[in-house]
Amino acid sequence: MLDLEAIRSRFPALASGDVILDNPGGTQVPRAVTDRIVRYLHETNANHGGAFPTSRASDEVVAGARSAVADFLGAARPEEIAFGPNMTTLTFQMARSLSREWKPGDEIVLTRLDHDANVSPWLLAAADRGATVRWLDFDPADCTWNVEHLRSLVCERTKLVAVGWASNSVGTVNDVAGAAEAAHAAGALLYVDAVHYAPHGPIDVALAGADFLACSAYKFFGPHLGILWGRYDLLERTFAYKVRPAGDAPPDRWETGTQSFEAIAGTLGALEYLAWVGESFGGDALPALAGRHEGRRPALASAMTAIRAYEATLSRALLEALDAVPGLAVRGLTDPLRFDERVPTFSFTLSGHSPRAIAEELGRRGFRVWDGNYYAVGVTERLGLEGTGGMVRVGAVHYNTPEEIHRLGTVLREIARS
């Protein structure tokens, strides 16, 4: 079990007294992050590749962060990790590069369950190249899609399949490995949006079978920074839009312009924090992993395994709290026997109350939640909720407690009666 008191003590924002459940929009950061950022700016603030000590020290910090991210994602080598301003920008960049080889008659597969950052870049690229878009729909009853449907959509003309690892809207964890198998059987590439899954469970890109994967550090307790992983051979041979002096080898060819080195340093701090969680609370998972991996990978994988297990209790607490509210309808998986297919992100509507009004009232009472479509507009459109304000979203992470969830349920019952 996680020591919640020790964990929460490392997050200064939690001292506010608010119940922070807007985590899908961005998690809070531990002191390790701000310490790393301040130390970078005070001691090693210099541009890349200089002949003087602070530039070399800055490059060492970036290299350390790149190595840590590679461990976090299970990458084969640090050079497979590219940094950028955010996942959306990196995905637009990759869509432009990959689609150079598409032609009319080629096809791509997108899902209606994804955040639009894994939809619009590919839609626009397909429109530019005359490619056909096929849609992987989801079941509105539980907000899941199945691999058999995906297999029916791919063919020899399919160039790319883009899926999310977990839905930022309704919390569904998708079958990425199954999607990879289906895509590769058709000769297509698989691009995975892991932004919402990254704070909730272990990622191993090799086991998942992905070709590219993107995530964001500010969703796993770090600063605002985008991260792109790709198989080295693909990063090496895919055309890159870059300035002429930039290096031709990965990751240099994918990191356009000067990076936010302080954010990269902060990301290293976030992963150092997660390694501490794994070393402190990982239990039996840590020694089992240690024989197969070097570096931080065992501690990071152990942390995310422990976090995933603890968050299952938060999912159960959330479902129990929401089920007790008259007139409240949860959208997504509600079967406790299938909670291995979701993360503790729940969206709902409440009869007689608009999502914005509920979010505002919760905000007045010290609960931070989100409302609307959360940029997953395909979900609210498919559920028929886009024109009525979307849904209210509550998203827990490992620093949240069951007691906070119980308090949320009490307040929601009061709102329902008003």
Image (spheres, rainbow, N blue to C red):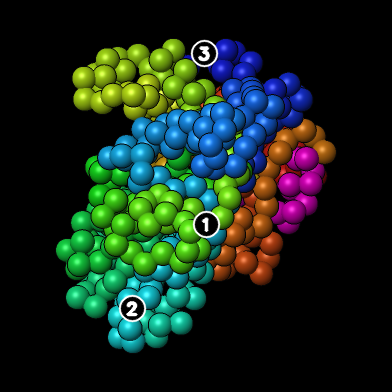
| Quarter of the view holding residue 137 | bottom left
Rate crowding at label 3 as few (under 14), some (14 to 19) or many (20 or more) other CA atoms within 10 Å.
few
Residue drawn 64% across the image and 16% down it = 9
Q: Which residue is mark 2?
A: 102
Magenta-drawn stretch contains 415: no
Residue 17 lies in what quarter of the image?
top right
From the image, state whether disc 1 or disc 2 is nearer to you. 1
Of mark 1 and mark 2, the one earlier in the sequence is 2
How far is mark 1 from mark 3, CA to CA? Answer: 41 Å
Instruction: State if disc 3 and disc 1 touch (CB < 8 Å).
Output: no
- Closest to the camera, between mark 1 and mark 3, is 1
* Residue drawn where x is 33% and y is 64% of the image: 238
Q: Mark 1 or mark 3, which has the lower sequence index?
A: 3
Magenta stretch? 346-363
Q: Secondary structure at mark 2?
A: loop
Taking the view exactly as shown, the residue that stands out farthest to the left is 185
Ranked by sequence position, the earlier of labels 2 and 3 is 3
Report helix, strand or loop for mark 3. Answer: loop
Residue identified by numbered label 3: 3
Residue 281 sits above or below residue 243 on the image: above
The residues tagged by marks 1 and 2 sit, at their Cα atoms, a distance apart of 23 Å
Residue with the mark numbered 1: 256
**Quick one: 395 or 40, which is closer to the camera?**
40
Verify whether residue 352 appears in magenta: yes
The disc labelled 3 sits on which kind of residue?
Answer: Asp
Residue 98 placement (x, y as % from top left) = 37, 68
Answer left or right for 218 relative to 141: right
Q: Which is more toward the observer, 143 or 219?
A: 219
Tell me residue 184's x, y (percent).
21, 61
In which quadrant is the C terminus drawn?
A: top right
Q: Residue 157 lies in what quarter of the image?
A: bottom left
Left or right: 341 as drawn, with respect to 217 = left
